[in-house]
Image (cartoon, rainbow, N blue to C red):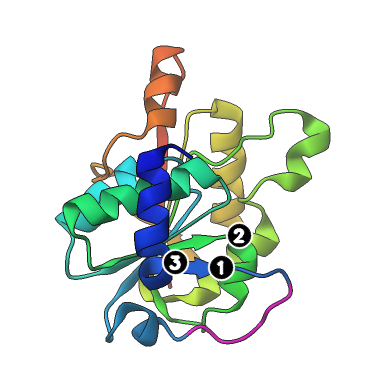
Amino acid sequence: MSSRHADAHAALWPRLGLTVTDGDRTPLDLAELFGGPVPVVLEIGFGMGDATAAMAAADPGRGYLGVEVHTPGIGNLLALAGELELGNLRVARGDAMELVHRIAPGALDAVHVFFPDPWPKARHHKRRLIRPGNVALLRERLRPGGVLHCATDWPEYAVAMAETLDADPGLRPLPAAPHGRPETKFERRGSAAGRPITDLRYARS
């Protein structure tokens, strides 16, 4: 980490950080984590965290819980949280689906999965985040009407995502609408390479 990231980590991790341990199924008290009951958005794989920080700053009425394994990204998001004085942001380090197992059914207002690794080779498709078992688990954690919002810049993955989400019996697609999220670094990279951006929004029935 850079000195800026390291300083932010040292200062803010004890208050804003959460370590995810594989196999830990201890229920996570979101009200305790955020210092009170608030609607919570789970963001899986926030990268460097710029978009996450922007969303949290623009949406102070909801708590944002971002989970990532990338150390520089965690440091950068903590630095942004300090600079923007974001009291509604928490940062988790570890496997996202391990964290999801600790969240109570119906506890989340929204789940964001923006530009996950597309694992383009066929033999690696089983590693993709948006696959039936994971989608069912994410849907169960949403409140009725809660939104699962996915985005990708890989057309083949967009088709696979849509097929998986359409097949889940507890989700219904939402009408096309402006995506309402800041542009991410991965999105800019995909656009620069000429790849179309696909946003998929579904609500829990």
Image vertical order of residue 50 relative to residue 175, above or below: above
Q: Which portion, as a residue range, is magenta?
A: 23-28
Residue topped by disc 1: 19
Q: Dots 2 and 1: beta carbons under 8 Å?
A: yes
Coordinates of residue 77 in the picture (x, y in percent): 36, 49
**Would you say the residues marked 3 and 1 are in contact, meaning their CB atoms lie under 8 Å apart?**
yes
In front of the other: 165 or 72: 72
Q: Are marks 2 and 3 in contact (CB under 8 Å)?
A: no
Residue occupying image coordinates x 58% and y 79%: 102
* Circle 2 residue: 94
Q: Residues within 10 Å of mark 3 (few under 14, many from 20)?
A: many
Q: Earlier in the sequence, mark 2 or mark 3?
A: 3
Q: Tell me the amino acid under the disc marked 3.
A: Gly
SS label for mark 1: strand
Residue with the mark numbered 3? 17
Res. 205 image quadrant: bottom left
Q: Disc 2 residue type?
A: Gly
SS majority, magenta? loop
> Which label sits on residue 195?
none
Of labels 2 and 3, the one closer to you: 3
